[in-house]
Image (cartoon, rainbow, N blue to C red):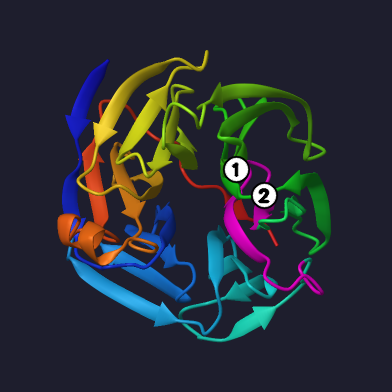
Amino acid sequence: MNQANAHHLLSVNCDLGEGPLWHPSEHCLYWVDIEVGHIHKYFPGTKIHETYHLGLSIGALGFREQGGLILATGQGFAFWDPKVGKLELLINPLAGKPGVRMNDGKVDPAGRFWAGSLDHSGNGALYRFDPDLSCHQILSKITISNGLDWSPDQKTFYYTDSADQAIYSFEYDQDSGCVKNRQIFVHIPSDISQIVPDGLAVDAEGYIWSACWDGGKVIRYNPLGEAIFELILPVSRVTSLTFGGENLDGLFITTAATGLNPDQLDKEPLAGDLFYYKTNTFGKPASFFRG
């Protein structure tokens, strides 16, 4: 299997960096530090780095067609615009569920925002938040809802439940926003590996890139689920990734320092930082929420 090394891009020391997303017109990268409640914004061209503190956990973000962001937060779905700085809370599917928070999410090709919850009791869910501001539960009995994306032909939905050590594939209907026929796309047995599948992105060729929590790498899979390439990082807790840059051929990778003991942190001084790799392929442009 071919391998390459990612390059250190930005010292940011996130506790739990996640959910990177490239904004095509602002020419910058957004991502979150989940439990700290930070939104980061970085302009590679000028090296300007901005940080916003929202005061609550933020699992994922997406861009809105009318400007600003849609968020999956510790208090449910919300709108937020950095130009205004006001947080508008919408629907909270986690009400009455103490200790449960929202995790990874992404806008689908039809402009709906999908995000799931992290519930260590196994009663989490994957939700779809529609442009009419209605919320629909798509999957149940989820433990750690994680990386998700859609194939370039918009017929397949890929979804990760980290606790299952699995990436699943579903048939996806863009018109209805429904999924069916769940199949195991990749399963990483926990008894032979410490690697946990985390964030995920699908490139323009239909290949799946999966971040490996405690694995120190990103794995690229072909559409048959065969690992064909490894991107190595100098930190163990690789959380998520997205394609960005003017040609969408750069891979931006977030990492985490949370849970590492002092000895591990001494060995991983770059834990929580942002990394980059120039690929030989291209990503898909981000979809925008239509509500």
Q: Secondary structure at mark 1?
A: helix
The vertical placement of 68 against 275, above or below, is below
Image mark count: 2
Q: Nearer the viewer, residue 183 or 31?
A: 183
| Residue placed under numbered mark 2 in the picture | 143
Image coordinates of residue 150 in percent, x first then y, are 59, 34
Specify whether residue 10 is painted magenta.
Answer: no
| Residue placed under numbered mark 1 in the picture | 163
Image coordinates of residue 222 in percent, x first then y, are 45, 17
Quarter in which the N terminus is drawn: top left
Q: Nearer the viewer, residue 74 or 266?
A: 266
Q: Is residue 243 visible to the viewer in this orientation of the structure?
A: yes
Specify whether residue 103 is painted magenta.
Answer: yes
Find the magenta span and give its range. Answer: 94-117
The amino acid sitting under disc 2 is Thr
Q: In the shown orientation, is residue 68 left or right of residue 14? A: right
Contact, CB < 8 Å: mark 2 with mark 1? yes
Quarter in which the C terminus is drawn: bottom right
Identified at 68% across, 75% down, the residue is: 75
The vertical placement of 87 against 146, above or below, is below
Q: In the shown orientation, is residue 162 left or right of residue 127? A: left
Identified at 56% across, 47% down, the residue is: 287
